[in-house]
Image: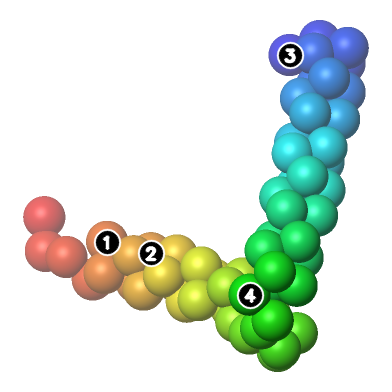
Amino acid sequence: MPFNRLALILVVVIAAAAVTVWLAMLAAAAFSLPQAATALVPLALLAFVLVRLLRDRTKDP
């Protein structure tokens, strides 16, 4: 993969993450959620990915 394409993908992914965090903070402020609730979303996603990964590795072929 050319370096230019890799750099473009990294910039786009980082920008999308920044926009997502910004929108989540706006939504949390609008619904007056505590900041701890916004920290639970990435933890829940991480737990979901780990569970899926472990289930796929323990399946019998």
Which type of secondary structure does the marked residue at label 4 adopt? Answer: loop
Q: Label 2 amino acid?
A: Leu
The residue identified by callout 3 is 1
**Circles 4 and 1: CB atoms closer than 8 Å:** no
Quarter of the image where the C terminus is located: bottom left
Is 3 situated above or below 22? above
Q: For the residues carrying marks 4 and 3, which lies nearer the camera in this image?
A: 4
Q: Which circle's residue, 3 or 2, is located before the other in the chain?
A: 3
Q: Which circle's residue, 4 or 3, is located before the other in the chain?
A: 3
The residue identified by callout 2 is 53
Determine the CA span between mark 4 and mark 1. 37 Å
Determine the CA span between mark 4 and mark 3. 43 Å
Determine the CA span between mark 3 and mark 2. 27 Å
Q: For the residues carrying marks 2 and 4, which lies nearer the camera in this image?
A: 4
Residue 21 visible in the current orientation: no
Side of 25 relative to 38 (left or right): right
Is 60 situated above or below 14? below
**Circles 2 and 1: CB atoms closer than 8 Å:** yes
Which type of secondary structure does the marked residue at label 1 adopt? Answer: helix
The residue identified by callout 4 is 31
Residue beneath the point at 34% across and 65% down: 52
Determine the CA span between mark 3 and mark 1. 28 Å
Q: Position of residue 32 (x, y in %)?
A: 69, 81
Residue beneath the point at 82% across and 48% down: 18
Is 12 situated above or below 56? above
Is 2 situated above or below 7? above
Q: Which circle's residue, 4 or 1, is located before the other in the chain?
A: 4
Q: Label 4 amino acid?
A: Phe
Residue 60 visible in the current orientation: yes
Q: Position of residue 26 (x, y in %)?
A: 76, 61
The residue identified by callout 1 is 56
